[in-house]
Amino acid sequence: ATPTVAVPAKFAAGNVRIALVRQLSSGDYFEQWLAGAQAEAKALNVRLEISSGDGNNDKQALNLEQAVTAKADAIVVDHGFAQTVQPAIKKAVAAKIPLVAFDVDPGAPEAVALTQDDHEIAGQALSVLKADTGGSGEVLYIYVAGFAPLDRRNETWEQFKKDNPGIKQVAQIGVVNSSTASAVADQAKAALQANPGVKAIFAPYDEFAKGAALAVKELGLAEKVKIYGADVSTADIGVMTEPGSPWVATSATDPANVGRVAVRAAALLVAGSTVEHALTVPPALITQKGLRDSGISSVEQLTRAFPGLTTPDVARVPWAAS
Ligand code: SR1
């Protein structure tokens, strides 16, 4: 779309600093998200000051305190645990620094809360699991509590089990660290060996799904055990579409688009524009069959096939072309 208003002077002069305070930075999802945030910052002539806790919540809280002290024009908090980030978010609000919280509850009505539609993400993946299993069978579940998106997906999983009493969760595994996929692969191998009746794995984070896929392949179970995941990247598409892959469905947004939305929302707040308190980015259901049938091998091709993965109207910036 063509810009409808003039570029605010502060943006035109390149005088806007947005602090991006991350909890995690390794893995496909977080790398793509950052690339999107950086591209949007460049497009809006904004300086993005990036820090990461690298999984250390105290370090993230310290980085957030520093962004407040350094008087960033706006702050984007990307993931984190409510109890570690909310005290510093309160300080940002008191200092009148606009704040966007992605995938963490800011605990402050003044902040904009950005999420993906996590209930829909879980629901879409589980709809395929249900269709494939006929609504009954042993399932291995991968989950780590405390991460807001995973907690929301877990709510959907809990409801799904109530609605489908034939589905039996026989084991729960999960770890989030700087090498999540390989750690999950080790856990999944042990869980599958202990539970030979498992026919489905619900793995609602792509690092979980990649780990599960490794384990299933190494145990030679790909014909019998199918994986239902979340998120997508070009590497994930490669894993899903390779011959004999057990990863048959994922529900995902385009992470780069979500990173763009976060920066747009922060920029709008800097400009004094009104932004809805809650912004939600919808996912699309992506199946192995659909990817193979359409010959999709990258996220770029995927976003062309699913134009809804790009959401220019969520936090649209009226002075920017989109
Ligand atoms: C550890 S939390 C991982 C999730 O964060 C984002 O919401 C992604 O969708 C990913 O699944």
Image: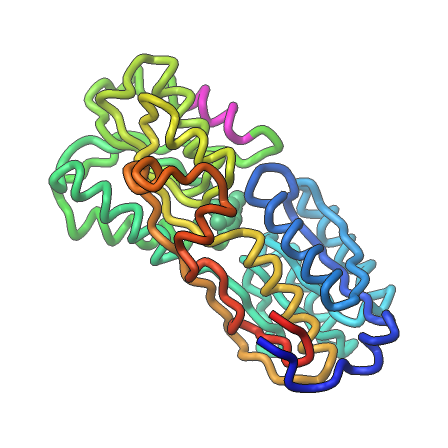
The magenta region covers 180-187
Q: Residue 45: name its quadrant.
A: bottom right
Q: Is residue 123 visible?
A: yes
Give the color scheme: rainbow, by chain, secondary structure or one colour.
rainbow
Residue 169: name its quadrant: top left
Q: Is residue 10 magenta?
A: no
Residue sitting at x 84%, y 69%: 71
Q: Is residue 138 above or below residue 7?
A: above
Q: Look at the magenta stretch and give its main secondary structure.
A: helix
Residue at the location (68% across, 70% down)?
266
Residue 96: image x %, image y %?
Answer: 76, 79
181 inside magenta stretch? yes
Reply above or below: 40 against 230: below
Instruction: Please tell me which residue is depicted at 33% across the width and 35% down the height of the picture.
Output: 292
- Give percent across and percent down for residue 261: 59, 65
- Say how many tags the image has: 0
Residue 140 visible in this rendered orientation of the protein: no
Residue 186 appears left or right of 26: left
Using residue 238 as the reference point, say whether residue 64 is left or right of it: right
Quadrant of image for the N terminus = bottom right
Q: Is residue 119 above or below residue 314?
A: above
Left or right: where 216 falls relative to 76: left
Kindly identify the residue that appears in the image at 36 percent across and 43 percent down.
250
Residue 93 percent coordinates (x, y): 71, 75
Q: Nearer the viewer, residue 251 or 173?
A: 251
> Which of the pair 220/41 is nearer the observer?
41
- Expressed as whole percent of the image width and height from the top left, the position of residue 280 reads 47, 67
